[in-house]
Amino acid sequence: MAIEKAVLGGGCFWCLDAVFREVSGVTDVVSGYAGGARPNPSYEQICTGATGHAEVVQLSFDSNVISFRDLLEIFFTIHDPTTLNRQGGDIGTQYRSVIFYQDALQKQIAEEVISTLESHTGISGPVVTQIAEAVPFWPAEVYHQNYFAQHPGQGYCQIVIAPKLNAFRKKFLR
């Protein structure tokens, strides 16, 4: 096994968490925070938008099973990379679209994927996804981990997460 890390933010981390838990080759998913100034922030602190953190997931993946490029293809399918600091009804800098690359190769792949996305698809506008160097990752509180599986009947899970999960399954789990 060749375990690598990826840190991605694309709106509420509950959505990303639910999808990436179903991806073959992803060995661990941790919801958390990255990109802000305050060490070990709380959910309440990042919700103010004042800490500068984004809601992200840290993925551990076996690159012999799934590539970083393939992870990004899934990532760009399950969120809108053309809306700045927003995903649906979730608004604020903590919901920004961001890739925290772990090394030069991940940075290059992210740039290539975004370039291809902008030039070869019918997206509605320019991609606003930030590509940023890896920064400290802070795990979110325990109650945020694997949220969808813990609360499948909750309104947000049914209205927002379930459709994204179904779209992912339809496209990638044939």
Image: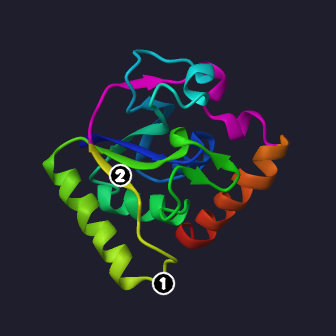
Dividing the picture into quadrants, the one containing residue 135 is top left
Instruction: Give the residue type at disc 1.
Output: Gly
**Residue bearing the label numbered 2:** 130
Residue 134 shows which numbered tag?
none
Asked if the residue under mark 2 is in contact with the one under mark 1, i.e. CB atoms within 8 Å, the reply is: no
Residue at (71%, 39%) from the top-left corner?
149
Residue 34 % position (x, y): 40, 31
Region of the chain picked out in magenta, as a range: 133-152
Q: Residue at x 67, y 56 (%)?
A: 88
Which residue is at 65% across, 59% downward?
Answer: 164
Quick check: 116 left or right of 123?
A: left
Q: Residue 98, how many percent across, how many down?
A: 40, 48
Q: How many marks?
A: 2
Image quarter where the C terminus lies is bottom right
Q: Looking at the picture, which amino acid does disc 2 mark? A: Gln
Compared to residue 97, the image places residue 138 above or below, namely: above
Residue lying farthest to the left in this orientation: 104
Q: How is the image coloured?
A: rainbow
Name the residue at 36% across, 62% down.
70
**In the rendered image, which quarter contains the N terminus?**
top left
> In the rendered view, does 8 fall on the left or right side of 84?
left
What residue does disc 1 label? 122
- Residue 62 as seen in the image, left or right of residue 153: left
Q: Position of residue 102 (x, y in %)?
A: 23, 41
Horizontally, residue 147 falls left or right of residue 122, namely right
Residue 151 in picture, x, y percent from top left: 78, 36
Residue 56's place in the image compared with 169, above or below, is above
Closer to us: 42 or 58: 42
